[in-house]
């Protein structure tokens, strides 16, 4: 059987203000014993943690990996003094399900092949519910397709169906013998998920036959802010995404547009309804959201004024640095890649080093889409298939697509296989990902990721919709 290369990324972040789980915890070491039933070779396991969730920081290696054979392995995570949220990425699975790790856990991870492109996984042992919840949740809600909705009514009905399915999974796990902290996390994640799904309508409304939306997607009087201002949830993806969508939704129509009015309104609502570390996170996230707006729809005076107000309210040194980075990026928008990112070294198929600047020079006078992907990314391969027609159509119109793999060059055999299979022209490898100035500049935490440059090499969009979402994708291209 031809070996495929599988990677495991566990991104682990400490939960703030969380109480220790002492039942059954004999020490501060977590051991995950793995069983690989896919028939694919596990080349290596990479265990790391993000210091501040999705804010964008260098990964810090945490675990120690040991391989017994191609079908068995173990991951040891030491010095786990408090419960942790983990994010498991890669493994050729959909999404990045979260895990809730407790000191002393001894758990078994089983990986099985679902089909040629996608694997499935589940955990066994004591506290397995802490590990399986998000996996089961993802399976329950993936059957619903928001993209198929043709108007607000149909979209809202689909959101309702997703929420019902999520509630069913939630109630199932609440009836299990799980920790009180875990119950609190999943209940409040479930609460805020509704806001994330509702706000996501702006990513799909371009395909609506009826584009009328209600004046307010969310009634601010119905929002339980006392439950949402929970610092211990700051490292939950669902929570932070949901809060950002909530703030945009209550701004009114169109609340997600990056305008000076919405920037000021969001700032006011954050200061009014949130306190402490949650407020600091949301203020930093707000300025990141507007600072990384390549279209510069907010004037520099308004951005600088709100930025200063936010900066003065933040004490956390990491959030302050995040804001400084956002401000720098704001004033570099509509410009070519900064020098350090442009000089980032990639490798071609033969391992020859080449800078991003040189690659872009070869494609001058043409608009460029840079597609970041990896051989272990199931969502990337799904998008290669679903977005193929749209990409080919754009290539015929003169758009250049540059593919950048986040794999190691040592995995070049599998890279070449996928490049040929999906007909990826102009593919390069970002071999040294963790130290890459390009990765840090773009804050790449999730793939697939698409970056748009105009024919003069200026950045126009840092996080394009997927090509398979053709109307949204092409509506941005139309602004060039």
Image (cartoon, helix red, strand yellow):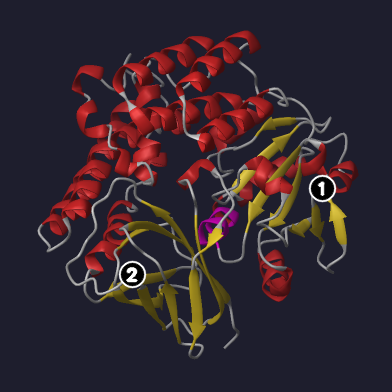
Location of residue 12 in the rendering, given as x and y in whole percent from the top left corner:
43, 58
Q: Is residue 102 above or below residue 114?
A: above
Q: Where is residue 414, by image quadrant?
A: bottom right
Q: Nearer the viewer, residue 287 or 430?
A: 287
The secondary structure that dominates the magenta segment is helix
Where the C terminus falls, by quadrant? top right
How far apart are the alpha carbons under marks 1 and 2? 44 Å
User: Which residue is located at x 50 percent, y 83 percent?
Assistant: 66
The mark closer to the camera, 1 or 2, is: 2
Identify residue for label 2.
28
Location of residue 98 in the rendering, given as x and y in whole percent from the top left corner:
36, 57
Q: Is residue 110 visible?
A: no
Identify residue for label 1.
356
User: Which residue is located at x 47 percent, y 34 percent?
Assistant: 316
Location of residue 335 in the rendering, given as x and y in whole percent from the top left corner:
77, 27
At mark 1, the secondary structure is helix
Q: Which residues are magenta?
A: 377-384
Say if mark 1 contacts mark 2, CB within 8 Å.
no
Q: Residues within 10 Å of mark 2 (few under 14, many from 20)?
A: some
Outermost residue on the bottom side: it is 69
Q: Nearer the viewer, residue 312 or 370?
A: 312
Whether residue 470 is in magenta: the answer is no
Of the two numbered discs 1 and 2 on the same chain, state the one appearing first in sequence.
2
Outermost residue on the left side: it is 175
250 on left or right of 425? left
Q: Is residue 416 above or below residue 265?
A: below
23 on left or right of 117? left
Q: Is residue 38 visible?
A: yes
């Amino acid at each position: 059987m031809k070996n495929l290369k599988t990677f495991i990324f566990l991104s682990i972040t400490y939960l703030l203000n969380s109480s220790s789980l002492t039942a059954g915890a004999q020490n501060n070491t977590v051991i995950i014993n793995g069983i690989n039933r896919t028939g694919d070779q596990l080349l290596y396991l990479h265990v790391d943690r993000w210091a501040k969730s999705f804010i964008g920081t260098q990964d810090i290696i945490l675990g120690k990996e040991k391989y017994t054979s191609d079908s068995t392995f173990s991951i040891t995570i030491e010095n786990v003094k408090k419960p942790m949220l983990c994010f498991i990425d890669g493994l050729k699975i959909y999404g990045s399900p979260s895990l809730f790790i407790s000191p002393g856990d001894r758990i078994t991870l089983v990986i099985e092949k679902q089909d040629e492109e996608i694997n499935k996984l589940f955990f066994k042992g004591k506290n397995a519910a802490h590990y399986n919840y998000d996996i089961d949740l993802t399976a329950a809600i993936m059957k619903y397709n928001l993209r198929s909705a043709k108007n607000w009514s149909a979209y809202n009905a689909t959101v309702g169906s997703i929420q019902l399915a999520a509630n069913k999974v939630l109630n199932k796990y609440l009836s299990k013998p799980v920790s009180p902290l875990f119950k609190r996390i999943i209940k409040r994640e479930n609460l805020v998920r509704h806001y994330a799904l509702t706000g996501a309508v702006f990513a799909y409304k371009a395909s609506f036959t009826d584009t009328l939306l209600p004046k307010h997607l969310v009634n601010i009087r119905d929002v339980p802010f006392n439950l949402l201002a929970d610092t211990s949830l700051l490292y939950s993806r669902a929570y932070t995404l949901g809060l950002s969508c909530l703030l945009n939704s209550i701004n009114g129509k169109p609340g997600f547009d990056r305008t000076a009015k919405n920037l000021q309104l969001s700032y006011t609502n954050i200061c009014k309804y949130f306190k402490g570390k949650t407020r600091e996170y949301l203020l930093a996230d707000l300025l990141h959201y507007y600072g990384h707006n390549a279209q510069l729809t907010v004037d520099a005076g308004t951005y600088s004024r709100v930025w200063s107000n936010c900066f003065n309210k933040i004490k956390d040194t990491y959030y302050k640095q995040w804001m400084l980075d956002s401000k720098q990026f704001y004033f570099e928008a509509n410009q070519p890649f900064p020098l350090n990112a442009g000089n980032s070294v990639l490798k071609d198929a033969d391992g020859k080093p080449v800078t991003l600047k040189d690659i872009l020079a070869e494609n001058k006078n043409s608009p460029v889409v840079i597609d970041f992907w990896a051989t272990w990314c199931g969502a990337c391969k799904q998008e290669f298939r679903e977005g193929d027609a749209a990409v080919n159509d754009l290539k015929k119109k003169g758009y250049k697509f540059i593919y950048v793999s986040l794999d190691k060059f040592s995995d070049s055999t599998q890279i070449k296989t996928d490049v040929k299979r999906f007909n990826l022209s102009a593919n390069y490898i970002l071999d040294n990902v963790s130290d890459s100035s390009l990765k840090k500049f773009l804050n790449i935490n999730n793939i697939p990721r698409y970056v748009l440059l105009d024919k003069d090499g200026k950045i126009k969009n840092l996080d394009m919709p997927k090509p398979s979402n053709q109307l949204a994708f092409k509506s941005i291209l139309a602004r060039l």
